[in-house]
Image: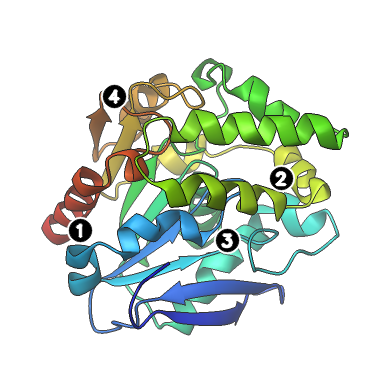
Amino acid sequence: MGVTKLHELRIASLDGTELAVISNGKTDLPPIIFVHGTCSSYKIWHQQFNDSKLNEHFHLIAFDLRGHGHSEKPKVAEFYTEGERWAGDLFSIFEYFNLRKVFIVAWSYGGRVVNDYLKVFGKSMLSGINFIAAGTLATESVKGPGYAVLSALYDESQTVRENAEKRFVTDLTQNVADDYIANQMLNDLSAVPLNVRIFMRNRRMDYEDVLAKLDLPVLLTHGKKDLYSLPLLAELLEVHLPKASTSWYKNDGHIPFLSSPNRFNNELAKFVLTV
């Protein structure tokens, strides 16, 4: 990822699953942990780790979700269908670094991991959350036309899956001026086994009660041209979250942190420093 003094670690979750974790090592600064989405890896955050302002002023941490990237990939369904296990991943990282008052940035499926944590452990360790088109509400109306592509990522046919992977990457990167990311996204997709994808897809989304009680500051980041999580998602979350504000990216899709990295990084830094 080209980041100087990047620390790569292996951290065991509460259930023993080993997670691949990176940190810029600046443990005396306010911590920000980045949680990626389905079939991705911590490398999706390379524009954030390469940003001089974020790297200078914050303790940056990211990790590969279980079943993804260089993290361990258990073969048993319960390791993916039980929310307590995903919650335990974040808890274990917090404990390893002795983190208190953490800011979390959660993109797409990463929103589910954060909500799992809130459901199991509560909000006391968190200072604020940045949800980016994040998996939070079990509402069919927020699903865009891209969900047809997502469905094909779970197909039994390898040919169908590979075609869907290429379409998925094309959809997400059409406004991204970064040659590195398309190839990396394809590599990340190929690293997630079919059974892991299916286990993750089949687990229930039930976070409305958690969100209704969440009084932490929340920044909602959403692209107006998102084909996967429609802008309606951010509009509904504003209703659920009493301390939420929304930053709309008029010309961006599902990954505004890569299509408009400078703006995103500046807004994230401002959010963390002013909460």
CA neighbours of label 2 inside 10 A, class few (<14), some (14 to 19), many (20+) = some
- Which residue lies under the disc numbered 3? 87
Q: Which mark is residue 28?
A: none
Residue 101 is left or right of residue 197, and the answer is left
Where residue 237 sits in the image (x, y, percent)?
37, 30
> Are the residues flagged by discs 3 and 1 in contact, CB closer than 8 Å?
no
Which of the two discs, 4 and 3, labels the residue nearer the N terminus? 3
Residue at 55% from the left image edge and 49% from the top image edge: 183
Which of the two discs, 4 and 1, labels the residue nearer the N terminus? 4
Q: Amino acid at mark 1?
A: Val
Residue at 23% from the left image edge and 34% from the top image edge: 247
Decide if residue 223 is in sight here. Answer: yes
Q: Amino acid at mark 4?
A: Asn
Q: CA distance from mark 4 to mark 1?
A: 24 Å
Q: Which mark is residue 272?
A: 1
Q: CA distance from mark 2 to mark 3?
A: 14 Å
Q: How many marks?
A: 4
Where residue 234 sits in the image (x, y, percent)?
36, 28
Choose between 75 and 244: the one closer to the eye.
75
Residue at disc 4, secondary structure: loop
Residue at disc 3, secondary structure: helix
Where residue 154 sits in the image (x, y, percent)?
77, 35
Which of the two discs, 2 and 3, labels the residue nearer the N terminus? 3
Q: Amino acid at mark 2?
A: Met
- Which residue lies under the disc numbered 2? 200
> Are the residues flagged by discs 4 and 1 in contact, CB closer than 8 Å?
no
In this rendering, which labeled residue sits more in front, label 4 or label 3?
Answer: 4
- Which residue lies under the disc numbered 4? 251
Residue at disc 2, secondary structure: helix
Which of the two discs, 1 and 2, labels the residue nearer the N terminus? 2
> Are the residues flagged by discs 2 and 3 in contact, CB closer than 8 Å?
no
